[in-house]
Image (cartoon, helix red, strand yellow):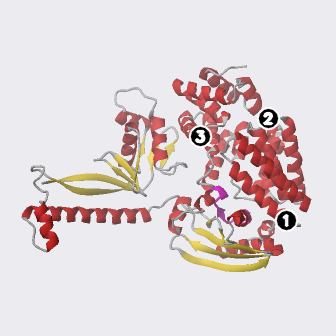
Amino acid sequence: MHTLDHQVFQFGSFRLDLTRGCVFDGDREIELRPKSFEVLRYLVENAGRLVSKDELIGRIWPNVIVNDDSRCVSDVRQAVRDETQQIVKTVPRRGYLFTAPVSQVTEATSASMGSATADVPSTDGRAAAVAGVAPPASGRKWMWYAGGVALLLLVAIALGMRLWRSSPGLALPDKPSIAVLPFKNLSGDPDQEYFSDGMTEELITSLSKFSGLFIIARESAFRYRRSQADERQIGRELGVRYLVEGSVRRDGDRVRVSARLVDTENSRQVWADSYDERMIGLFALQDEVARQITVTLVSHVTTAELNRSLRTPPGSMAAYDFYLQERAEMRRSIGLDRRTQLASIMKARDLLHRSLEADPRFAGAFAALAGTYVRSWRERLNDEYRQPSTLDRALEYGRQAVELDPYMAEAHAQLAYVLHWQYRRGEALREFERAFELNPNLADGRYGLMLIHNGRSAEAIPFIRRVMRLDPLHVPDLYSYLGNAYFLTGDYSNSLEMHRIAASRIASVPQVHVWHAAIAAQMDQMDESHAAAATVLRLEPEFTISKFQALIRLADKNDAERLGAALLKAGLPES
């Protein structure tokens, strides 16, 4: 018998087994193309050291001219869930840096050097062992081997768990960082989940207004609704020090809320309280929970911030209830087929009109109404698609929301987006800047798109990266926005990588494939470019480059010319 040493690298929950040529995330094997595996192997073996692009190509593709390195790096990032490029960092114009702590483990397993049956116990040996009689030598030998392998497996598992638990995850911000997990619905009625979700979202919004806190966006926090992960794992994955957990029980005209603040480093409870209020006092209760958490974590909170966190509640609980139902309806509609999405939007509008019948001065309902018209203008669902009158309705509702509640950051952001597509871009930027003054943690990537269209792509890149950090499990649209910015700043390799991710995750949006076709053409990946262009024409048969340029109206003439030339090269019709 001889021993085979299996060389294994461990980083976070991942194991790279060089002997077997495979990658595992926990117990799940990850599929990687051979060249992508070799890229991961080389980066891991050189963790902590800058690897230039030339060096990587020379090692993986010696004596071959290639353009496949960025796709392999993209494969690697997807495999290790590195959507924000915190593990495999791109150092512009210099190369790649693998930043995760890596440890090397040698797993020893046994192999026979004799005949195929030399170490296999006989049937008699097994029976003797069961009867308490010493088995033959071959049987004893086999049992020793089995025991040794089992012990090694236990040691490997224990070491893996230790490394996984000590994995640093995302770096913590330099201020108290919090994720508010979805509050549990204890009402006994699943249809009341929209209400507990609404309570959670309002708390996220209130906490976001404190500049002394770092608040994870709703989309990422809600991914943990039914997760079995413990506080420490969630803290690592979201990059936060604290979690807010709670429950809501709605009973007639009363609501009971329990909330607690947990330190993710040690699962210690920092603060907890429970409340029993009549529904009419719900908004004061939400404000009180937010202030309690903030004062617990921030040594100095200004009066202005405390006042800013207070919201203008609707004058009717019925208005608020319809509003929460509408938000749940709009979220459910995302990603569904066109007919179902349209039905959901129409239902949402009906709920909002009922909300405004109950309280004609409810700013939240007006802002949400504007959002439904922005959605139907942006997506080809009915005859409201790309119609100026659709944006006019959105503008009307957005202005009413801002007038009724000037301190509602989301209303300013919604209004800004409408103004942007009405080409009143100076006004749009000012509205968004006001939104960020009111809510420093507002994770709205649309501002990044506006910067790109206004010739400020270099500013858009760090902004979108920040949104990705506030929302680690963010919507895939951000990859497209970031890819656009990289394209217009001349960072074509990163642009192609981002657009490949975006195209794979939002396959039904024509604009994503337009930019993908452009950057693939720019990088001379013509098969890929033509495939993306074909997708554009399938989704939008009347597409032309001139129409697209007129729609996005890039402020920088050079940006527009470069994009137009790339789209022509991709084979898309000019006019």
Residue 312 shows in the view: no
* Whole-percent x, y for residue 349 in the image: 82, 50
- Residue under the image location 10 percent in, 73 percent down: 133
Where 530 falls versus 49 (above or below)?
Answer: above
User: How far is mark 1 from mark 2, CA to CA?
Assistant: 33 Å
The residue that mark 2 highlights is 386
At label 1, counting other C-alpha atoms closer than 10 Å, the crowd grade (few under 14, some 14-19, many 20 or more) is: some
Eye-nearest disc, 1 or 2 = 1
* Whole-percent x, y for residue 249 in the image: 70, 74
Residue contact at pointers 1 and 2, CB within 8 angstroms: no
The residue that mark 1 highlights is 318
Instruction: Quadrant for residue 339, please give it.
Output: top right
Callout 1: helix, strand or loop?
helix
Image-based side of 284 in relation to 573, left or right: right
Marker disc for residue 502: 3
Image-based side of 103 in relation to 320, left or right: left
The amino acid at mark 3 is: Ala
* Whole-percent x, y for residue 227 in the image: 55, 63
Marker disc for residue 12: none
